[in-house]
Amino acid sequence: MRLSNTLIPTLRDAPQDAEIESHKLMMRAGLIRKLGAGLYTFLPMGLRALRNVERIIREEMARAGAIEVLMPSLQPREIWETTGRYETLKKSMFRIRDRQDRDMVLGPTHEEVITELVSHELNSYRQLPRTFYQIQTKFRDEIRPRFGLMRAREFIMKDAYSFDLDWDCLDRSYQAMYAAYQRIFERCGLRVKIVEADTGAMGGNASHEFMVLAEAGEDGIVECESCAYAANVERGERALTPAVEEPAGAGLVDVATPNARTIEEVSKFLKLPARRLIKTLIYLADGKPVAALLAGDRDLNEIKLRKALGCTELVLADAAQVESATGAPVGFAGPIGLTIPVIADAGLQGRASLAAGANKADTHLVHVSVTRDVGAARFHDLVNAKTGDACPRCAAGKLREMRGIEVGHVFKLGTKYSEAFHAAYLDANKEKKTMIMGCYGIGVTRTLQAIIEQSHDENGIIWPAGVAPFLAAVLPLSPNETCMNTALKLEEELIRAGIDALVDDRDERPGVKFKDADLLGCPIRIVVSDRSLAEGKVELRKRSEKTSQLVPLEEAVSRVETLFS
Ligand code: ATP
Ligand code: MG
């Protein structure tokens, strides 16, 4: 392809709203353009790379035995009501109305549609197991669309759904998808970390996320330094050494702490480390106030708190609600003397010599003993695991925190959807059984950007060969016909060898061509110039390496081939 025949609008500077490197590079290399918040057009280079990711996914899905279908984005409200998700997903779902005033949804995911289909089309044990997938556009009204394709409102997902006879059979389907995901990400040139993920109300070890490790990732991960344990912080646990009862010491004492509200302010004022303070957070669980306690150096995990309380809605109380529940302004809540239920993080059990709010303005209590003074509390794991905690799996190792980009997610669903849609089969004894489901997603467009986030340098993208929009960039440098014709002939020969090449046929200075070639990131650069041609040679350089080599023109194609074999 000649560069002048396509659209590759490279930019010197990234737009203001591009915060992370991969987003900047996608804009600068002319892969995408923004239409509105979380809405992007794919330009030719971006689209070619995207198609490569999709091709890898299709090949690996086929290898794993999954069947491709294509479901509508536009869906009737009724199927979403069947599972209750018309309500529970309402905030993130795009809803529209047709000309007959019927409510419709732009699909954020497709469990409902596929299960409705399968409930009609499959009904015998002979037809199971089956895994269906599609590569299709999803719509989600994200609170904060950002980072380009990472969190968009319209994006492409590969979503797969398995239908099995029983739980053992699901284990095998799950394992097949898990292995396919490992191969897909490897072929995309990505290093991924597979972590245990939160399973919502289901419990059990039935969900994994595929994380691309990157500072810019929106997900927190904890992993053990010595064993294989790794989990999303939403789920990550820590080993709690059996609570050692610290001596209660002196009795409670009121201390004036004027204007010291935050953990930082109180810690400074009382000259106590944050871990010696009790953080008291007032929440409304299904509308009723409850106090959650944790050590001052910890972050509350709302998913764990919700589970421990068994509530569906959990919101942090506002200032007025805090005041009515504790009798004190925000910043001075504490567990002692409260009339609302108290739930505490298990890490606080047995601890003493702590400080806590006194439920009185500008006052804290010191010498708090959890056992003596907060006896009524229930203890649960309520906080995020963090660096230095003991590993819950091997106990010997320490955990460390990392950040990741969730590119894939596999999940054992069970019967939630198959029950709702009566997706059942007759077994060998003609007995009716509910199908057991799994679902498996890959953010295709997010994966594309994650590849760039993990593979770039200060000059631009470094495409892994499997996904590169073109394997080779051919740069005719000298402004004369021989040079240009040699470049175009080289392109033809490369194509014959199955290697797509981009010829920079623009009337530009060498410096501009070099800069853009680095920015665009094709794995191989072939420079054709009068100087090298005088010796019958061209210059070959791998984008990932600093040094180039002169090779005889007639050997150029075979040399490129060997570089990729
Ligand atoms: P997140 O926690 O990042 O919002 P999710 O857990 O809601 O994602 P899933 O429902 O598991 O997402 O969707 C499967 C995959 O689709 C995710 O692993 C992710 O790669 C991708 N994905 C989800 N939301 C978006 C989005 N707004 N933009 C781009 N890709 C997305
Ligand atoms: Mg997910």
Image (cartoon, rainbow, N blue to C red):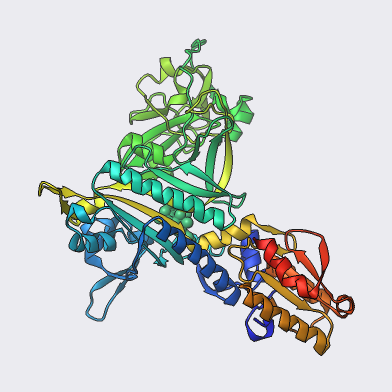
Query: In front: 513, or 470?
Result: 470
Q: Residue furthest left?
A: 430
Q: Position of residue 380 (x, y in %)?
A: 39, 28
Quadrant in which the C terminus appears: bottom right
Vertical side of 240 occupied by 100: above or below = below
Q: Quadrant of residue 290?
A: top left
Q: Position of residue 512 (x, y in %)?
A: 79, 76
Q: Quadrant of residue 562?
A: bottom right
Quadrant in which the N terminus appears: bottom right
Residue at x 50%, y 10% (from the top left corner) = 247
Q: Is residue 165 left or right of residue 509?
A: left
Query: In front: 462, or 428?
Result: 428
Q: Quadrant of residue 2?
A: bottom right
Residue 558 in view, yes or no: yes
Query: In front: 103, or 112?
Result: 112
Q: Is residue 478 left or right of residue 353?
A: right
Residue at x 76%, y 86% (from the top left corner) = 485
Vertical side of 539 occupied by 443: above or below = above
Q: Position of residue 143 (x, y in %)?
A: 45, 59
Query: In front: 215, or 253?
Result: 215
Residue at x 65%, y 78% (from the top left corner) = 8
Q: Residue furthest bottom?
A: 481
Residue at x 48%, y 14% (from the top left corner) = 244
Q: Position of residue 238 (x, y in %)?
A: 49, 29
